[in-house]
Image (tube, rainbow, N blue to C red):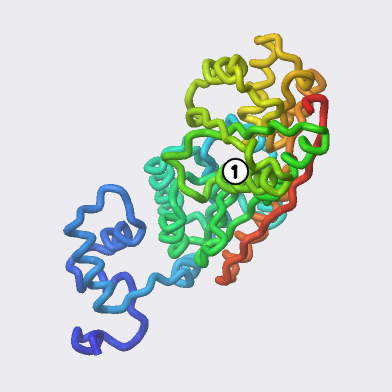
Amino acid sequence: MEKQKLGMSTDRVTIRHVAEHAGVSVAAVSKVLRNAYGVSEALRKKVEHSIDLLKYRPSMAARAMRGRTHTVGILVVELTNPFVPVLLEGIDAGLAEANYKAMVGVGRAASKLETSMIESMIDNRMDGLILIGPQMSGSVIADYASQIPIVAIAHHEAHASLYDTVNSDDFLGAQSAVEALAARGYRDIAMLGYDRSDSPTSVVAVAREAGYEAAMARLGLGDKARIIRFPHPSEPRHRDFATLLAASDRPRAIFCWSDLDAIPLLAACHEAGINVPGELAVIGYDDCSVAKLPAVSLSSINQSPQELGLRACDLLLSRIEGRDVAQHILVPPEVVLRRSV
């Protein structure tokens, strides 16, 4: 046996054993395990070689034995989306009931910043993490989930085994949006999306686009289906709205992937003198607080953000208590019709 050859006991191999075998510090091994930024390839290979030889497996239980901090880290992509504060209220309510506190970090849709913040939260001994709309891949999240309990919201990865997910049923929600427009007599229905070339396939827009295309096909409108892509939401798009509205082939109705685009689209229609819904019908996704204002009156898909937050909190707390079988929850969305259709 490799452990016996190395003069070690046959008890569970610890991180200290790995450090001694590799000739490095425990902190160095921890950085490699966390895939921390700045770790050299030489150090990584040395530590991974020792891990393989010793058959070391990081222990979540060992972490728990150091004592809980009753603190949860929450990482969000950005705070400008009105949907996010309501979601955070749901999470906070669940945590408060269990006597947990939260530390919130903003990733700004930058994967390097996200990973850096996750590592800081791990280093500060958070008991678990909730990721909202993470821009990193599922494999990266899984690496961190081997070190700390994680639940991801607005991240579709139904086959993930090391972490949980809670989502609006975005596929169903998009279908419902198209069906609501078709029920009002609209046939030329386009979807307004964005350039996803730099986004992982787990983002909500992917499921919403699939739902849109499926509904159009089922309604016999597949030949009219088209997804209009704007630059990423973080970039200015005033000119894109103006170009869309001035186009000779402008659709009769538009399903926007998010209220983040639906509300500016309504504003652009107002500026261009285009009557909504007389000349263009619009439906969004999120049903944010602005959509509900009488002056805006945007039809939208309500994804119950408070329920999403509470469900994510429940899953994380059960993860912290030791559950290790992944759960993936889809919350049914609801169509809310207002004057825009």
In the rendering, at what x and y percent does residue 69 appear? Answer: 53, 57
Residue at image x 33%, y 78%? 13
x and y, in percent, of residue 153 in the image: 59, 50
Relative placement, left or right, of 336 versus 263 is: right
Q: Nearer the viewer, residue 80 or 320?
A: 80
Q: Position of residue 63 (x, y in %)?
A: 45, 66
- From this viewpoint, is residue 74 visible? no
Q: Is residue 106 left or right of residue 297?
A: left
The structure residue drawn at horizontal position 59% and vertical position 35%, both measured from the top left corner, is 226
Whether residue 133 appears in this view of the structure is yes
Is residue 63 placed above or below 165 in the rendered structure?
Answer: below
Which residue is labeled 1 in the image? 209
Circle 1: residue type: Glu
Classed neighbour count for the residue bearing mark 1: other residues with Cα under 10 Å, few (<14), some (14–19), many (≥20):
many
Q: Count the numbered circles shown.
A: 1
| Closer-to-camera residue (197/150) | 197
Quadrant location of the C terminus? top right
Q: Quadrant of the N terminus?
A: bottom left
Q: Quadrant of residue 270?
A: top right
The vertical placement of 172 against 321, above or below, is: above
Position in image of residue 4 (x %, y %): 23, 89
Q: Quadrant of residue 5?
A: bottom left
Q: Is residue 221 above or below residue 121?
A: above
Q: Say which residue appears at 50% left-offset and 46% top-offset.
A: 134
Front position in the image: 36 or 296? 296
Q: Quadrant of residue 265?
A: top right
Q: Is residue 53 above or below residue 177?
A: below
